[in-house]
Amino acid sequence: MDNNIIVREATVADVHYAETITNEMAESAKARGTGIAKRSPEYVKMKMEEGKAVIAVTPVGEWVGFCYIESWEHEKFVANSGLIVSPAFRKSGVATLIKQKVFALSRKKYPDAKIFGLTTGLAVMKINSDLGYEPVTYSELTTDEEFWKGCQSCVNYEILKSKERKNCMCTAMLYDPVEKAKEAEQKKLHQVGPGNFWGRDMRSDNRLFDRWVKFKQFVLLKGWRKKEDEGSPRKPSLMSLFFW
């Protein structure tokens, strides 16, 4: 990665990047064939003006990446949303720096809030896990209707509706400061660190992430495309209990 890239809190002086950022968000989602909640340049500008965003730029002012903060349920929940990196700087490690910076900003502004994310990206899940997020069911996320309205522009919205908002193609991950404080107290007694999943560390095992995501997507798509027979409920398996 170019060590000269500057990752910092965005300010009102950065609003001229807003249209470039939102255009790249839309193009990236189209290229991946996955969903993303659409955001307008005006919305991105507002986040910059509020001091609730992180931006990455080169010393000469070329835009590199961006991410912003949203709060829900009277600041009980916080989401780090809209992570995007310019194509010229992808796979350089800058996404990790942006996520680290916006996570730190979230903790500073909302120290008691639960920080959550929804993503289909393996790389983002790995970064989140490194920061202390853990995979959770959708029931542990915010119930704020305004948050879920943002999913209406996603290509997978019909799946979300069919699952009664209990699951979708995205994986839910959560950082709970209360639980992390408890873990810190118990760390000496229990040698299971944050990110451990079924006895294995997700932070250092990308293959586990990959298999997990593929399995989840397979189950979701299969269930969505094929209606279950009426009157023949199935017993939930261990895997279904975790993912559903």
Image (tube, grey):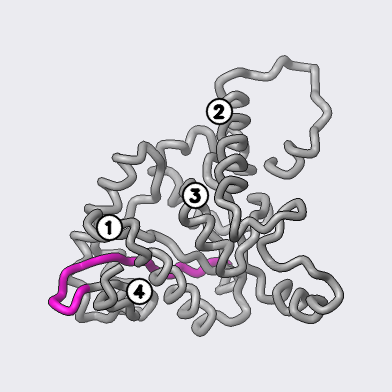
Task: Residue at the far right: name it.
Answer: 189
Residue wearing tag 3: 122
Between disc 3 and disc 2, the foreground one is 3
Is 73 on the left-hand or right-hand side of 105?
A: right
Q: Which label number is shown at residue 237?
A: none
Mark with earlier residue (4, 3):
4
Q: Is residue 84 left or right of residue 18?
A: right
Amino acid identity at mark 4: Val
The percent position of residue 163, horizontal first and vertical second, equals 61, 35
> Can residue 159 be seen by looking at this rendering?
yes
Tags 4 and 1 in contact by the CB under 8 Å rule?
A: no
Residue positioned 28% across, 76% down in the render = 3
Q: Nearer the viewer, mark 3 or mark 1?
A: 3
Where disc 2 sits, the SS reads helix
- Which quadrant of the figure has residue 41? bottom left
Q: Tell me if label 3 and label 1 are in contact, CB under 8 Å.
A: no
Q: Which residue is mark 2?
A: 221
Query: What amino acid does circle 2 point to?
Result: Leu
Q: Is disc 1 in contact with disc 2, using a CB cutoff of under 8 Å?
A: no
Is tag 3's residue or tag 2's residue first in the polypeptide sequence?
3
**Residue in view at x 73 percent, y 79 percent:** 181
* Residue 40 disc label: 1
Answer above or below: position of 235 versus 205: above
Q: CA distance from mark 1 to mark 2?
A: 30 Å
Please provide the residue range marked out in magenta.
Answer: 58-73
Foreground: disc 4 or disc 3: 3
State the residue lying farthest toward the left.
Answer: 60
Q: Earlier in the sequence, mark 4 or mark 2?
A: 4
The answer to whether residue 142 is seen in the rendering is: no
Amino acid found under the numbered disc labelled 3: Leu
